[in-house]
Image (cartoon, grey):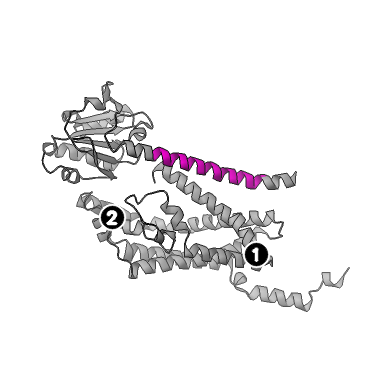
Amino acid sequence: MKRKLKYLIPIFLLSIIGWLGWQVQAKIQEKEAIEANRAQLPAFKFEELSGATFASTQLAPYKPVVVMFIHPECPHCQYEAEALYHQREHHQHIQWLLISEAPKEQLQWLSNTYKLDSLPNVSVLMSEMGGFYSFFGTESLPSTFVYDSGGRLKKYFRGEVKLEAIFKLFPFP
Amino acid sequence: MNRHSYFMTSQELYLTQQEESSFWYTGSNWQWFLLICLVYASSSFINQTFILSDSLFYNSYGEQMAYERIEQILDFQAKWEWIGYAVLPLFISIKLMLVALCLLAGAIWEEYKIGFRKIWSMVLRAELGFAIASLITVGYLALFAELHRLEDLQTFHNFSLLAFVPIGEDINAWYLYPLRVISIFEVLYWVILVKGMQAISKRGFEEIFGLVGRSYGLGLLLWVMLVIFLKLNMGI
């Protein structure tokens, strides 16, 4: 019995290492596939605060798109939402999608507090858990993907970003 | 009963005296723990004061973030810097405990008669190697490295296999961590652990090298796999 137990422990440890290795391999492949997919604006569907479905096909053609993954409780995200309203005159040529996995009430609060509902080129969208990740391959808060008018990924910002850094990518509106 | 059961032979007495005067038995565990905490705290202080300068943050985030926001983050960091020092003994204890448990498992597997206390004392002294390595790293970074951005720090090879691998744009790539683990310091640490285990078990180098490989080596492999797994799944 004791002898059997002696061999069971290393077998158990090696099994965990093997399982982790297998998971890591699968995750790397999944990430690579998502990263290749997001190089061009993916065909996604999210939910608007009104309950309607918002599909990527509804985006106006030939206009830059900025996709932000946010959470209403995240201070960096609040800063970005505030900046969007304050600098509204400077980004009317850009379509902004603020996507979150937070509950509807919190997103409604963010939208009202920072008057995002008054900006026609800004959409606050809800994603189910893991939904954003399946299209964009990240769950870091905040994450910002900037797409040019041809739908090609121009820049990915991890963490807070000032709007000027995004405007710089489109010198001419 | 045999006379030897009561009295040590002169050779045994000589060996015991030699053992007690060797490096692995000097000082108390508390003194060693304090010394190691002090060395790590010193390298942390050098890191905070001379390496992680404000200009490094401004250079790194200036293009992406507003000046006043970086300022706020730096103020916040300065305010809570003491927490890093406060939790240092806890992190050191956890690390030492994990290494000691791995070696204890190896010793039990090989049916050696060594208690946890002896292994813990040895691991505690061996940690001085890593603590000095952290001082060498920060000393090198502060005096010789050309640091312009935080990315330069994140991709610093630290005398590891990373020195031989070209680093792409993704400084958070999953493979950077395992490459950084295999360093000159890690190899030296293995040698120190083998020497320490040899001293407390009185066994040959090859036998103990195998034991350290099967116990600490397996533990390290598990740790590295776990970190890569978390990095990939949590985006850290």
Q: Which residues are magenta?
A: A8-31
Q: Nearer the viewer, residue B102 or B96?
A: B102
Does residue B38 show up?
A: no
Name the residue tied to disc 1: B206
Give a yes or no on whether discs 1 and 2 share a subunit: yes
Is A34 placed above or below B142 here?
A: above
Does residue B212 show up?
A: yes
Name the spot of residue B88 as percent of width and height, x first: 45, 58
Name the spot of residue A108 as percent of width and height, x first: 26, 28
* Circle 1: element type: helix
Name the residue tied to disc 2: B74
Q: Quadrant of residue A124?
A: top left
Q: Residue drawn at (28%, 55%), measured in percent from left and top?
A: B74
Q: Nearer the viewer, residue B83 or B123?
A: B123
Count of labels in the image: 2
Q: Nearer the viewer, residue A5 or B40?
A: A5
Question: In terms of sequence position, does the residue under pointer 1 or pointer 2 come before the other?
Answer: 2
Disc 1 versus disc 2: distance between alpha carbons? Answer: 51 Å
* Circle 2: element type: helix
Dot 1 crowding, Cα within 10 Å, few <14, some 14–19, many 20+? few
Q: Residue drawn at (28%, 52%), measured in percent from left and top?
A: B73
Is A11 placed above or below B188 here?
A: above
